[in-house]
Image (cartoon, rainbow, N blue to C red):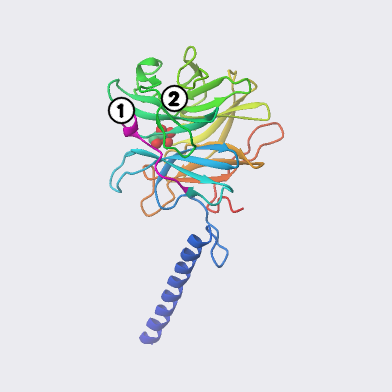
């Protein structure tokens, strides 16, 4: 009896191992599809930890920029020295490009390749990044520039664009983080950023100088991670709400406000206390890009993974709450 039980147990174990192996082998060879049609495309980057996604639609591709989470498994804070770039023509298959930008490319910065965003103007690509400043206490925003969306990028300014001493609304020294950028239809560019306080300012046409005063926007439970975008004559300002973070958003008919709070857009991202969204339209569909800690066994708040799911608008312009999925984008 004992022998029969052991034999049966071994057969079950071996066959289940085979199934897993077959699925993994097919998944990598077939863009996430397995022989028995299990499709788990989230997270979209499976071989590295990635956080703070930003995306740029340029010509017929999407470029995804993310910070590289390099924290060892026993280290419970961010360890981020470089940013990564990936591209896709269909939001399903992603190609990794060589490392386009590192903290060390900014001679005045010391560490912390935190959240960022890239925008194109007149054939040049400007990358607004968060880093820690070497000489001025606190976080700062720098600008990289390149002739290609995949880089390599170099410091466009030779100094920070925004430093902690330029904003005085809070006593914390990490309120100048998480830049998001938009060029409005009239050609005026704007930079938004912040932690605890949401700041914004105009940018000059050269994209490397502020143009006028730094202003603030009052948003309920604003934590960080603003993302500015426009869709059908509405401006949207989404942001990380409370902590651990959900994503909420406000809408306005003008980029200068007033902003009307519209509620929660995305719920807590599982085992990651941050969520950090990017929102894009690409080939007629809308996408919500974010991070969670789904890559196991060691994924979590400091070893994050970028995911993508569909975003849907209501007829009145409000956005439907995002449904985070393991399947992700399948076609
Ligand atoms: O990645 C470091 C910080 O975590 C970012 O700047 C925030 O948005 C949060 O995601």
**In the image, which residues are magenta?**
96-111
In the rendered view, tell whether residue 17 sits above or below residue 312: below
Q: Secondary structure at mark 2?
A: loop
Quadrant of residue 76 within the rendered picture: top left
Q: Is mark 1 within 8 Å of ligand 1?
A: no
- Tell me how far mark 2 sits from mark 1, CA to CA: 23 Å
Image quarter hosting the N terminus: bottom left
Mark 2, residue position? 194
Q: Is residue 38 magenta?
A: no
Q: Is residue 207 left or right of residue 83?
A: right
- Residue at (56% x, 67% y) in the render: 36
Eyeballing the image, is 168 above or below 44? above
Viewer-proximal residue, 206 or 281? 206
Report how many numbered discs are placed on residues in the image.
2
Q: Is residue 100 magenta?
A: yes
Residue at 44% across, 52% down: 46
Q: Which residue is mark 1?
A: 107
- Give the secondary structure at mark 1: loop
């Amino acid at each position: 009896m004992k022998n029969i039980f052991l034999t049966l147990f071994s057969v079950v174990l071996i066959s289940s191992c085979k199934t897993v192996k077959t699925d993994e082998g097919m998944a990598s060879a077939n863009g996430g599809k397995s022989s028995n049609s299990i499709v788990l495309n989230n997270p979209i980057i499976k071989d590295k930890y990635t956080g703070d996604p930003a995306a740029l639609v340029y010509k017929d591709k999407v470029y995804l920029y993310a910070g590289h989470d390099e924290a060892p498994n026993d280290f419970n804070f961010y360890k981020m020295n470089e940013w990564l770039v990936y591209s896709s023509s269909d939001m399903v298959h992603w190609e990794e490009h060589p490392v386009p930008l590192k903290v060390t490319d900014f001679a005045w910065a010391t560490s912390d390749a935190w959240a960022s965003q890239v925008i194109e103007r007149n054939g040049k690509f400007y990358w607004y990044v968060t880093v820690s400043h070497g000489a001025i206490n606190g976080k700062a925003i720098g600008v990289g520039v390149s002739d290609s969306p995949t880089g390599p990028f170099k410091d466009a300014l030779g100094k920070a664009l925004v430093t902690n001493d330029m904003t005085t609304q809070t006593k914390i020294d990490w309120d100048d983080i998480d830049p998001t950028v938009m060029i409005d239809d009239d050609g005026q560019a704007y930079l938004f950023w912040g932690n605890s306080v949401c700041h914004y300012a105009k940018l000059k046409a050269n994209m490397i100088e502020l143009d006028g005063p730094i202003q603030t926007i009052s948003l309920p439970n604003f934590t960080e991670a603003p993302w500015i975008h426009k869709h059908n004559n509405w401006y949207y300002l989404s942001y990380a709400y409370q902590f651990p973070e959900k994503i909420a958003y406000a809408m306005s008919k003008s980029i200068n406000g007033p902003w009307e709070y519209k509620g929660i857009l995305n719920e807590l991202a599982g085992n990651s206390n941050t969520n950090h969204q990017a929102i894009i339209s690409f080939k007629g569909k809308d996408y919500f890009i974010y991070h969670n800690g789904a890559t196991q066994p060691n994924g979590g708040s400091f070893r994050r993974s970028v995911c993508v799911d569909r975003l849907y608008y209501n007829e009145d312009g409000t956005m439907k709450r995002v449904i985070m999925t393991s399947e992700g984008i399948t076609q």
